[in-house]
Structure formats: structure tokens, C-alpha cells
Image (cartoon, grey):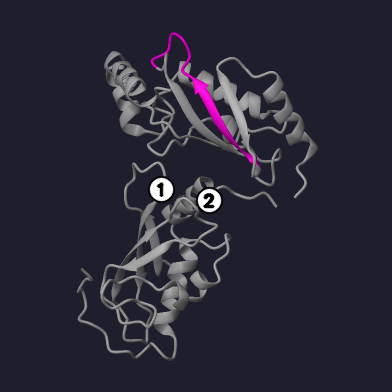
């Protein structure tokens, strides 16, 4: 059950030098399983929100990407009702050169730039395309309702 | 081996179930597609051929608690069925009487439970058991 050195290194660095607005804490009983918190980026509809996620490094990591999911409800065209995230680097664009940190920074960036042309939540994406202002307003409401610390 | 946490295991099971498992004789899905904890599931078993269950469709509910998959799920039939492992009043499956629940390990899943129940239906002891009328439900 020895943890690969790479995972130990990454975890140490996440603790010692966390990325702004992101925290990741490994579970004591499973060092491949992390509780993640991402602060909603400023100038985004998610500003002021605190979003909980979970991250798991599968056996094949880093040859396979981490698995990441939102636990906090969020109104976003690329995140579905079960918190699954549509992000290329979590799928076919994964490279072992990426890390937990880069993945979480990409998720944070996705909050700043929703992409309704590559949707996971179709109804949300359609709302975003038809009436962006109204969609943003709903996203702000959900942030206030569900993403408070 | 990496120990897959509950939620990611259930997510894998969900995605497998959505694609369709095996020959389609057993299937399952989330009972509430909004439930971020993925606790409650619906299952379906198509009665095995050449038994009294042939052509019957059985509905079940399955609950995966916070300790799943370290602990087995709790399983109940919604459709009435006469099997030794099923409580005839409530439809609950007695975990002591179903092999995969009694000898549970965390590599098992919802598919294991449903296929094990279907195997029970087809076992030499059970295949000819008298059955309640088709389509009746436990209350």
C-alpha cells in the first residue's frame, strides 16, 4: 500500500504552497482521496461562493487523470447535476506532466469562463446561450443559496 | 491497490449502468438524478428463462449508505416474489441468506447483487417455487 513518491511530493507541495483560492486536504485513511475547496473567482458569477469538491488519484495515476467532482451544487454549463466536470484535461487531454495543482487551477479557471459550446448540463448551456444575463443571475443565486461556507 | 472512495465507486457503477450491463437481464439506475450522494437506486431483474420467473420483470430498490462499499447495500424487492432470501411481508432481502451480501467485499457492486438474486431465481431449489400473481407489489 506504499504511496508513490510523486503523490507524496505533490501532497507536500499542496500543503506548503497552496494555490490562491484552492485548498486540498488528503483523507488520513486514504491518502489518494482529497477534500478540495475552491473559492469562486472574482468577477465570475461564482464570486463569494465556497465550493466543495472531492478528488481521487486512481491506481494508474499519473498515467491516468485524477477523478474530480463537485459536491456543492453549482449552475454551470460544464458541470452536471451530479457534480461531474467536462474538462478536456480530465479526459483525452490528460498528460502525466499535469498535476493535482494544475487540475484544480483549471477547474477554478473553468468557473471564470463557462463554455456553453461544450456542455455537460444541456439545459444550463442552452440557458447560457439564449440569455446569458439571466443564466448568470441564476448562477449567482445558486452561489448564494448553496455555496456559502 | 488504490482504495476507491464510495462516491467515485458509485459514479463508476452509475456510468456502467447507463451504458447497460451484460446481456441486459439486470439493470439499475439512480432513483433521483439530482442526489449528489447517490444513495438510492432502482434495480430491475428480468426473470430467468425456463423457470417460473420467465418473462417477469422484477423491480427493486437499493440503498447505498455512507459506509458503502465497505458495507453492503440494503436491498428490497418492490415486486412480489417468493424466494427464501426475501422477506414475504416487506420484500427485504435478508443479507444472511444471499451469498454476495453475506460474504460482501468492496469490489462487489450493484451488478453483483442483482445477478446473484437472478441466480437464486434460477437455482434448482427455487426455479419452481409457486409465485404470487405477476405484477403484484410489496407494500
The answer to whether marks 1 and 2 sit on the same chain is yes
| Magenta-colored span | A31-45
Q: Disc 1 to disc 2, how far (Cα)?
A: 10 Å
Q: Residue furthest front?
A: A28
The residue at 38%/15% (across/down) is A45
Task: Say whether residue A43 is magenta.
Answer: yes
Name the one closer to the observer, A124 or A36.
A36
Query: Which residue is disc 2 drawn over?
Result: B9
Quarter holding residue B59:
bottom left
In the image, residue B34 sits, relative to residue A99, either above or below, namely below
Confirm whether residue A3 shows in the render. yes
Q: Secondary structure at mark 1?
A: loop
The residue at 78%/46% (across/down) is A2
Confirm whether residue B22 shows in the render. no
In the image, residue B79 sits, relative to residue B33, either above or below, namely below
The residue at 48%/47% (across/down) is B11
Q: In the rendered image, which quarter contains the C terminus of chain B?
A: bottom left
Query: Which residue is disc 1 drawn over?
Result: B38
Left or right: residue B24 versus residue B53 is right
Where residue A26 appears, x then y in whole percent? 63, 35
Quarter holding residue B85:
bottom left
The residue at 43%/54% (across/down) is B65
Give the mark count: 2
Report crowding for label 1: few under 14, some 14 to 19, many 20 or more residues within 10 A (C-alpha).
Answer: many
Q: Chain of mark 1?
A: B
Q: Chain of mark 2?
A: B
Task: Say whether residue A62 is magenta.
Answer: no
Name the one closer to the observer, A44 or A127.
A44
Amino acid at each position: 500500500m506504499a504511496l508513490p513518491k510523486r503523490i507524496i511530493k505533490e501532497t507536500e507541495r499542496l500543503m506548503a504552497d497552496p494555490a490562491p483560492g484552492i485548498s486540498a486536504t488528503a483523507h488520513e485513511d486514504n491518502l489518494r482521496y482529497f477534500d478540495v475547496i475552491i473559492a469562486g473567482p472574482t468577477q465570475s458569477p461564482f464570486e463569494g461562493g465556497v465550493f466543495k469538491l472531492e478528488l481521487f488519484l486512481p491506481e494508474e495515476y499519473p498515467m491516468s487523470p485524477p477523478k474530480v467532482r463537485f459536491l456543492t451544487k453549482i449552475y454551470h454549463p460544464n458541470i452536471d447535476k451530479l457534480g461531474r466536470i467536462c474538462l478536456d484535461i480530465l479526459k483525452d487531454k490528460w498528460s502525466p506532466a499535469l498535476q493535482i495543482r494544475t487540475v484544480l487551477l483549471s477547474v477554478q479557471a473553468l468557473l471564470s469562463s463557462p463554455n456553453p459550446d461544450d456542455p455537460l448540463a444541456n439545459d444550463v448551456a442552452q440557458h447560457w446561450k439564449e440569455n446569458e444575463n439571466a443564466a448568470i443571475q441564476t448562477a449567482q443565486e445558486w452561489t448564494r443559496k448553496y455555496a456559502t461556507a | 491497490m488504490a482504495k476507491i472512495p464510495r462516491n467515485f465507486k458509485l459514479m463508476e457503477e452509475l456510468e456502467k449502468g447507463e451504458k447497460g450491463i451484460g446481456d441486459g437481464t439486470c439493470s439499475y439506475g439512480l432513483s433521483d438524478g439530482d442526489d449528489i450522494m447517490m444513495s438510492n437506486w432502482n434495480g430491475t431483474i428480468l426473470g430467468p428463462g425456463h423457470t417460473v420467473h420467465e418473462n417477469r420483470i422484477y423491480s427493486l430498490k437499493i440503498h447505498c449508505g455512507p459506509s458503502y462499499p465497505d458495507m453492503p447495500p440494503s436491498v428490497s424487492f418492490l415486486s412480489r416474489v417468493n424466494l427464501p432470501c426475501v422477506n414475504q411481508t416487506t420484500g427485504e432481502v435478508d443479507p444472511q441468506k444471499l451469498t454476495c451480501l453475506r460474504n460482501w467485499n468492496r469490489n462487489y457492486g450493484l451488478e453483483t447483487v442483482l445477478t446473484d438474486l437472478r441466480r437464486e431465481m434460477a437455482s434448482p431449489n427455487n426455479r419452481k417455487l409457486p409465485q404470487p400473481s405477476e405484477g403484484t407489489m410489496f407494500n
